[in-house]
Image (tube, rainbow, N blue to C red):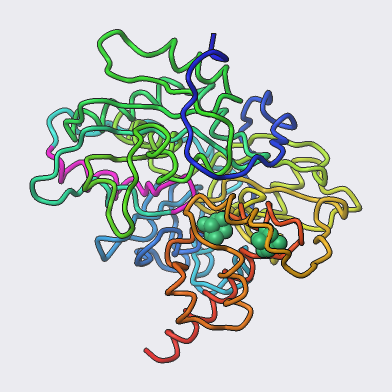
């Protein structure tokens, strides 16, 4: 039935092998509680929240430990009942040191989180909705970590027409969004209904790639006849889950550079974000547990897990039987946009969608050859940039020229690198040039 459906897609992009078989059929398991948790303050775009606890304090699972002091910020809650042991710099996945709260779990606490009644969302204004989402600590779980409430504060006169649930999960290996759609379809639909009601949107669309046909069927089965929610199967293609690509695929609309999709009447949220919204408004449960996929040929027992925030990656891997001896690289996130982890003691944070381990075979960098001007990177770029030119300019550190060539639009999706037959690490060159630009800006400000 679905195979004959007209499939929605965007132009360009690539088709990397999916590798989702490792975990797609594995139900999500809850990770047991550990002794120590590291909660970096900066888990959202914008300003980090500020600690409201002191060393030695007793905290309860779900209690706020850092509060936002700015609009672009979000509350951080304790993932466990225990004691604050330290507040100071800790090493994160990228290798840099950032301010974090360290919590020692109480080994005798039940770590149960009982539902708490919340005010009726049906009687809330749009501003109250935004404040509640900020209090719940919910950020965009699709990767960007934008505090979720920011999207719900609309410009004067803007009318939302469409709410999109992003269930594309186009990164290879990752299956945690797939599992949430299969295991908690009602929560995803409830989150959509809350947003649709409060934002007075006309319609809701759930975009799901066709390699998750069971999730499409499960969502469709739970949509009530009076709900204006439609599940739309998408062609399997990377980066289908990029917000601009998904809007193009579903609505045929190009979101111009510098324009917020909300200003065009479109709000998009990841399916995990929607379930988190339902959990807060229906049960008062803040965002403290992250669904992740642990996979790749280097992991002995791949799994989908529900992990308390702050759990060290080392413990996650231990639960999955550890790493194979020939493991070369561990990545947090997907293989296309994720980052190689600098230390296994780094914690799982709100946007850690996966922990992937690769052996020598997959992690080996291809031999780099000169550009043969084949144009494959241009064909692959979903933003219609010239990646080969950007790579050349990045190598020469010609930042102004990079800007003129549109580097601002690059989302670092890695499609160009994947497509390049000469093994040129295009996106890595762009990333490194951008990091230099930020460092320069930092020094001069
Ligand atoms: S140039 Fe940027 S946006 Fe284009 S394919 Fe490469 S990484 Fe993706
Ligand atoms: S794909 Fe690689 S070899 Fe081909 S034009 Fe782009 S950079 Fe050059």
Residue 241 or residue 399, whichever sits in front = 399
Residues drawn in magenta? 125-144
The spot of residue 255 in percent (x, y) is 32, 48
Residue 99 or residue 9, whichever sits in front = 9
Which quadrant of the picture is home to ligand 1?
bottom right
Q: Going by the image, does 160 lie left or right of 281?
A: left
Q: Quadrant of the N terminus?
A: top right
Picture residue at 43% right of the left edge, 67% below the top: 408
Picture residue at 26% right of the left edge, 32% below the top: 162
Is residue 253 in view? yes
The spot of residue 369 in percent (x, y) is 80, 68
Residue 280 or residue 129, whichever sits in front = 129
Rendered image quadrant of residue 205: top left
As drawn, 55 above or below 399: above
Picture residue at 73% right of the left edge, 41% below the top: 295
Q: Going by the image, does 161 lie left or right of 332?
A: left
Residue farthest left in this picture:
157
Residue 413 or residue 165, whichever sits in front = 413
The spot of residue 64 in percent (x, y) is 36, 53
């Amino acid at each position: 039935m679905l195979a004959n459906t007209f499939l929605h897609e965007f132009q360009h992009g690539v088709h990397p092998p999916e590798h989702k078989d490792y975990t797609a059929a594995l139900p999500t398991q809850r990770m047991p509680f550990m002794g120590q948790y590291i909660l970096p303050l900066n888990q959202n775009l914008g300003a980090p929240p500020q600690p409201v606890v002191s060393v030695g304090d007793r905290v309860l699972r779900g209690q706020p430990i850092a509060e936002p002091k700015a609009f672009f910020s979000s509350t951080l809650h304790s993932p466990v009942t225990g004691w604050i042991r330290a507040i100071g710099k800790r090493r994160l996945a990228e290798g840099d040191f950032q301010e974090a709260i360290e919590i020692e779990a109480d080994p005798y606490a039940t770590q149960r989180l009982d539902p708490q009644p919340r005010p009726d969302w049906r009687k809330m204004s749009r501003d109250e909705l935004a404040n509640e989402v900020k209090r719940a600590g919910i950020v965009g779980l699709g990767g960007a970590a934008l505090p979720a409430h920011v999207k719900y504060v609309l410009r004067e006169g803007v009318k939302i027409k469409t709410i999109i649930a992003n269930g594309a999960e186009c990164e290879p290996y990752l299956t945690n969004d797939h599992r949430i759609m299969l295991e908690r379809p009602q929560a995803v639909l409830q989150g959509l209904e809350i947003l649709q009601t409060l934002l007075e949107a006309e319609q809701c669309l759930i975009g799901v790639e066709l390699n998750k046909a069971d999730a499409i069927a499960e969502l469709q089965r739970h949509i009530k006849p009076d709900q204006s929610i439609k599940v739309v199967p998408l062609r399997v293609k990377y980066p289908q889950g990029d917000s601009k690509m998904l809007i193009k695929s579903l609505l045929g609309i190009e979101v111009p550079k510098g324009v917020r999709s909300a200003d065009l009447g479109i709000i998009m949220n990841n399916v995990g974000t929607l379930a988190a919204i339902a959990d807060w408004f229906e049960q008062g449960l803040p965002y403290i547990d992250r669904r992740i996929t642990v996979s790749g040929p280097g992991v002995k027992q791949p799994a989908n897990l529900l992990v308390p925030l702050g759990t060290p990656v080392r413990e996650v891997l231990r639960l999955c039987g550890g790493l194979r001896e020939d493991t070369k690289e561990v990545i947090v996130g997907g293989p296309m946009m994720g980052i190689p982890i600098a230390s296994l003691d780094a914690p799982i944070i709100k946007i850690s969608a996966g922990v992937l381990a690769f052996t020598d075979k997959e992690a080996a960098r291809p031999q780099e050859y000169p550009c043969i001007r084949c144009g494959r990177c241009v064909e692959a770029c979903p933003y219609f940039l010239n990646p080969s030119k950007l790579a050349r300019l990045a190598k020469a550190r010609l930042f102004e020229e990079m800007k003129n060539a549109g580097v601002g639009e690059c989302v670092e999706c890695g499609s160009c690198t994947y497509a390049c037959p000469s093994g040129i690490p295009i996106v890595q060159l762009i990333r490194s040039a951008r990091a230099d630009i930020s460092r320069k800006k930092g020094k001069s400000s």
